[in-house]
Image (cartoon, rainbow, N blue to C red):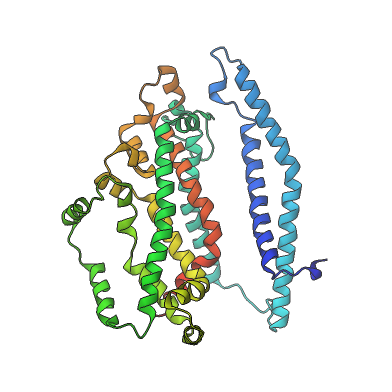
Amino acid sequence: MLGKLNSQSKSFLTVRKISVYLSVAVLIALIFFSYVSHVDIAEYWDDFGNLTESGQKLQTALTTLFWVFVALAPLAVGTLVFFFVLWHKERKEYYRLNNKSKLGKRVHAFDVVNFAWMAVFCVLCIYPIFYVLIGSFNQGADYAKGGVYLFPRVFTFENYRVVLEKGEMWHAYLVTLGRTVIGTVTALVFTSVVAYAMSRPNLKGKKFFYWANIFTMFFNGGLVPYFLIISSIGLFDSFWVYIIPGLYSVYNMIVISSFFSSISSELHEAALVDGASEFRIWWQIYMPLSKPVLATVALWLAVGHWNAYFDTMIYAPSENLHTLQYFLLRAIQSSTMTEGMTETMMQRVSAKTISLAAIIISVVPVMFFFPFVRKNFQSGIMIGSLKG
């Protein structure tokens, strides 16, 4: 059966990627619901230690979801095992065709040390996110006591409920989402147009333009002159202050231009002979061939827009222009999310745990976006760095 599959077809690779991601998501959900369905949730118990009516409904829903994912778990495990066996078969075939053998390989001390160091490094990178996650599910008063490192000590959904009921946060979320989508697309198109021009050897004044761009990477007028320029051209306190100043990056232009330069000039000459314009050559030939480097630059741009808050602080004082990161900054610094809460509510939540829940909600889109460009990320940055 495995031998009849065309594991190199584009459709199969897409199905495999989606299946693996869904299977991993099912197993993670199983672990999560197996935990929350067997713990006491703080806000659904009354003062006499009895489970409230809403608590009983929630407990029933969580238990039902737990058994649903228990039923899906064998399918998820079977999917992962199937694709692992197929991957192992592909690796054996690869070594057979290339006359390579893994039996002659020895494990050296360097390999062991390197693997151990990378494992420690991965834990150091992942644990801060995990620490924020478990803190966001912990009761506020209990979290203030400290000692919450591996699991929530007093489990609660109240922090997320408070965050999700904040209309200001959702407005900031939409502003950031619009800024990220529009800013990434427009900057990628504008920068790639300049990169295409800079990659052409027949561009008049190419050396002058190149060094003029390099000069701006190291020297600028500073914050005050830049603020005066933003004000004079009418971008102050406008949504376009997030888009127009970020349309062009010299570094991104150099990376994309280096990739364009590596494309065979014969394609360009053949297209010119067929009557194609420079714009059509850029759009229909160079852009489709440059997906790895474009995906890499798009990831840089998207993460930069999503995490930006300084330009909001300086150039966009209106509350309807506040981005998500600036909203989180204000919430953490001034504890605005806990204003007007009763004493009973303050026992369930705290400014710290609410901020942790808001942070988790803010990083979900970035974590969702990265897997789709992961394959092109390494190849894009490496290829784009070969030529200058």
x 66%, y 46%: residue: 26
The one nearer the camera, 85 or 319, is 319
- Of residue 4 and residue 144, the one placed in the foreground of this image is 4
Q: Quadrant of residue 218?
A: bottom left
Q: Nearer the viewer, residue 388 or 247?
A: 247
| For residue 279, side relative to residue 151 (left or right) | left
Where's residue 384, x and y in %?
A: 43, 74
Q: Residue furthest top?
A: 48
Q: Residue furthest right?
A: 1
The answer to whether residue 54 is visible is yes
In this rendering, is residue 175 above or below 188? above
Residue 295: x %, y % from top left: 49, 64
Position of the C terminus, as image quadrant, is: bottom left
Q: Residue at x 53, y 29 (%)?
A: 156
Residue 301 at what x, y percent from top left? 40, 59
Camera-nearest residue between 171 and 303: 171
In the shown orientation, is residue 147 left or right of residue 61? Answer: left
The reply, left or right, for residue 17 in relation to residue 163 is right
Which quadrant would residue 237 be assigned to in this image?
Answer: top left
Q: How many marks?
A: 0
Q: In the rendered view, would you say 264 is above or below 326?
A: below
Vertical comparison of 218 with 39: above or below: below
Which image quarter holds the N terminus? Answer: bottom right
Which percent across, then down, holds residue 246?
Answer: 33, 58
Asked if residue 51 can be seen in this view, the reply is: no
